[in-house]
Image (cartoon, helix red, strand yellow):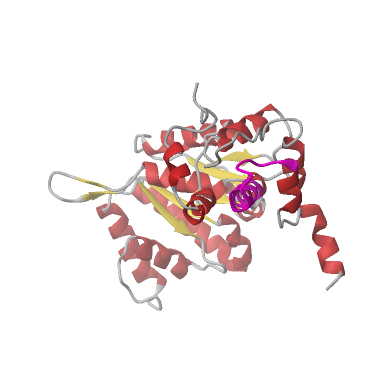
Amino acid sequence: MSEFDHLAAEVVPVLELSKTERKTFCREDRWIGYTRATEILGELDDLVNYPRGLRMPNVLVVGRSGNGKSSIIEHFSNSHGVRVTESGGPILPVLRIEMPDTPDQAQFWSVILWALLITHRETAPAKLLKREAKSALQYAHVGVLLIDEFNNLVNAGRKAGDVLAAIKELSNALKISIVAFGTQAAINALNLEPQMKSRFQPSSLQRWRLDAEYLRFLASYERLLPLAKPSGLATRDLAPRIYGLGGDTIGGTVNVVKAAATLAIELGTECITTSILDKVAWTSPGDWEKVAAVV
């Protein structure tokens, strides 16, 4: 038994760093494969290996803001980085883009070109940009197009149908699967084009509850915090307090734990306690109205 058994092996050496370095380590993003995230990643990995066919499968991942979409996107994209063929050509299994705030078809093709690091004239006609983008996607052997902020389509008005038609054409012509991430408004965007909607399989990130899965997440996250003493984040003393502060999104919980860990390092307690949580400068989701009331 070691006094640092509460930490992952790779975290133990971090205890030797300065306070500033340890606090920076706490604030860095960490990947923890909780059940729902692992299930969704499995669905997306299947698309990467899916044989090219007449009608490629697509997935729409929907969740509230701050509920883990960005972490899944990052992990999925990093797991399928660019490769090089024997002849020196690129193979890009997954291309990640973000839907523009108020998209139209020209902007859609433009963000694809920028994602592929291809310089172009953004004011060029949509037909020209489409030709360049499709050619580049084909050259790079892109298998999956990942579109973040898919919900921005609802801001496009009548042009939303044109963008969806462009996505459909792209998938049909190049046999590319589409993975879309967004808030609930992403469903409303697909409702604008029922035929396109039928091509997507919805996958949701539910709100978190104070249950066994949540406690497992806290226990796993504690092992990644460079604190010399165990905190017991998953205990009945701390878990409800953390949940109450962070709310029902995983992003809120992570931000609370990061803030508490850095404060524990700064104050020298070397563990997160109820007293530390009381001192964390954090406004829970339910207290925003109180903040607004004093402005």
**Which residue is found at the position 37% from the left and 61% from the top?**
115
Q: How many numbered callouts?
A: 0
Horizontal arrangement in the rendering, residue 292 relative to residue 259 (left or right): right
Residue span colored magenta: 254-274
Question: Is the C terminus in the top left, top right, bottom left or bottom right quadrant?
Answer: bottom right
Can see residue 118? Answer: yes
Q: Nearer the viewer, residue 272 or 139?
A: 272
**Which residue is found at the position 70% from the left and 41% from the top?**
273
Q: Is residue 136 above or below residue 205?
A: below
Residue closest to the far left: 87
Magenta-drawn stretch contains 30? no
Taken as a whole, is the magenta stretch helix, strand or loop?
Answer: helix
Task: Tell me residue 43's x, y (percent).
Answer: 49, 34
Task: Tell me residue 103's x, y (percent).
Answer: 53, 67
Magenta-drawn stretch contains 259? yes
The answer to which image quadrant residue 225 occupies is: top right
**Which residue is found at the position 75% from the left and 45% from the top?**
275
Task: Tell me residue 85's x, y (percent).
Answer: 18, 45
Q: Nearer the viewer, residue 267 or 39?
A: 267
Horizontal arrangement in the rendering, residue 92 relative to residue 287 (left or right): left
Task: Tell me residue 199's x, y (percent).
Answer: 52, 42
Q: Is residue 127 above or below residue 98?
A: below
**Which residue is found at the position 44% from the left and 44% from the top?**
16
Q: Nearer the viewer, residue 252 or 114?
A: 252
Can see residue 176? Answer: no
Q: Nearer the viewer, residue 253 or 56?
A: 253
Residue closest to the far front: 268
